[in-house]
Amino acid sequence: MEDMRQDMETILFDQAQLEAKVAQLGEQISRDYEGKDLLLVGVLKGSVVFMADLMRRITVPAAIDFMAVSSYGSGVKTSGVVRILKDLDRSIEGKDLLIVEDILDSGMTLHYLRDLLRDRGCASVRIVTLLDKPERRKVDIHPDYVGFQIPDAFVVGYGLDYAEKYRNLPYVGILKPSVYEGK
Ligand code: IMP
Ligand code: MG
C-alpha cells in the first residue's frame, strides 16, 4: 500500500468521500427503479469495486451481470477499437438495464456498448459512472448518473488500473506521469 501511495500525485477522493457518494447514487437509483426489472451490468474489470459497493446501497430488487470489453490494452490512450471479450450470461429482453462503469473518458466504449445492448430488446438502458472526464469526450454520450466529474488526468484506484496495477487501492488518486512516461 505504501509503495503504491508514492506513485500518486494527489489523492482525489478518499474512502469516506467515495462511500458517501456511492450511498447517494444508490438512493437515487433505488427511487428511480422502484417497480422496475433492474439489471446492473458491470463493465469488467474497472467497475467491480464500484459495483460491489453500489449494489449494496440499492434497496430495490436488482440482478447483476458483467461484460468485458477491450479498448485500451495496457496503455493510457484509447484506441477506439471495442472488442467483446465476455458477453452477458442471459437474455436482457424486457429488463431495465443500468450499465455500471468506472470512468467515462472518450465515451467510445460506452457509446458502443449502449447501442449494442439497446438492440437486444431491453426495456431501457441507462448509465451510471463513478467518474466522468467531460473534457475528453469524443462521441455524444451523457451518463444518467455521475459520481464525480474530474479534470483530464490519469487516475487509478477503487477498481481503476494502470497496466492492471492499483485496482485494490481504497481511494482514487492521480497517477504521477513519471510512472507511465517513457513506456
Ligand atoms: P472510453 O471509451 O475512452 O470512455 O474509455 C473508458 C475506459 O477507459 C474506462 O472504462 C477505463 O477502463 C479506461 N480509462 C479511461 N480513463 C482512465 C483513467 O484515467 N484511469 C484508468 N482507466 C481509464
Ligand atoms: Mg473500464
Image (tube, rainbow, N blue to C red):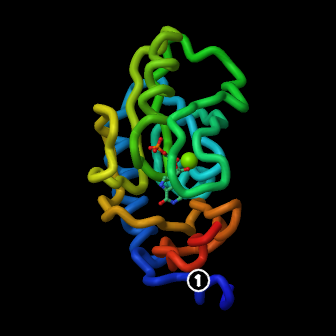
Q: How many neighbours does mark 1 have within 10 angstroms: few (below 14), some (14-19), or many (20 or more)?
A: some
Q: Quadrant of the C terminus?
A: bottom right
Q: In the figure, 129 relative to 88: above or below?
A: below
Quarter where residue 180 is shown: bottom right
Q: In the figure, 54 relative to 70: above or below?
A: below
Horizontal and vertical percent position of residue 106: 39, 44
Which residue is pictured at 47% across the width and 26% down the height?
112
- The foreground one among 158 and 80 is 80
Q: Which residue is mark 1?
A: 7
Q: Quadrant of the N terminus?
A: bottom right
Mark 1 Cβ and ligand 1 under 8 Å apart: no
Counting labels gives 1
- The foreground one among 57 and 175 is 175
Horizontal and vertical percent position of residue 121: 49, 9
From where the camera sits, is residue 62 visible? no
Quarter where residue 33 is shown: top left
Which residue is pictured at 45% across the width and 68% down the height?
19
- The foreground one among 106 and 110 is 106
Q: In the figure, 120 relative to 21: above or below?
A: above
Q: In the displayed structure, does residue 3 sit left or right of residue 46?
A: right
Which residue is pictured at 30% across the width and 59% down the height?
149
Horizontal and vertical percent position of residue 51: 56, 50
From where the camera sits, is residue 45 visible? yes
Amino acid at dot 1 = Asp
Which residue is pictured at 64% across the width and 44% down the height?
44
Horizontal and vertical percent position of residue 171: 52, 74
What SS does tag 1 mark?
A: loop
